């Protein structure tokens, strides 16, 4: 899903 991919990217950015 597009939303899922974007959420994963945001999650990674926040994790960093």
Image (spheres, rainbow, N blue to C red):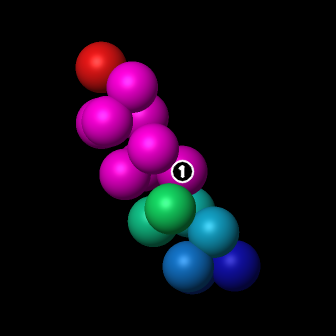
Position of residue 9 measured from the top left corner of the image (x, y, whole percent): 42, 49
Tag 1 residue: 8
Mark 1 Cα-neighbour bin, 10 Å: few <14, some 14–19, many ≥20: few
Image quadrant in which you'd find residue 5? bottom right
Q: Is residue 5 above or below residue 2?
A: above
Question: Where are the magenta residues, as a range?
Answer: 8-15
The answer to whether residue 3 is above or below residue 5 is below
Residue lying farthest to the bottom in this orientation: 2
- Please state which of residues 11 and 5 is positioned toward the viewer in this rendering: 11
- Total tally of numbered discs in the picture: 1
Residue, far right? 1
Image quadrant holding the C terminus, namely top left
Q: Nearer the viewer, residue 5 or 13?
A: 13
Determine the image quadrant of residue 1.
Answer: bottom right
Q: Kindly give the residue lying farthest to the top in the view shown.
A: 16
What residue do we see at 39% from left, 25% from top? 15
| Quadrant position of residue 3 | bottom right
Please say whether residue 10 is one of the residues in the magenta stretch. yes
The residue sitting at 42% across, 34% down in the picture is 12
**Relative to 3, 15 lies left or right:** left
Instruction: State the SS at label 1.
Output: helix
Q: In the figure, 10 relative to 6: above or below?
A: above
Residue 4 image offset from top left, x and y in percent: 63, 69
Q: Which SS type dominates the magenta stretch?
A: helix
């Amino acid at each position: 899903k597009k939303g899922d991919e974007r959420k994963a990217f945001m999650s990674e950015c926040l994790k960093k």
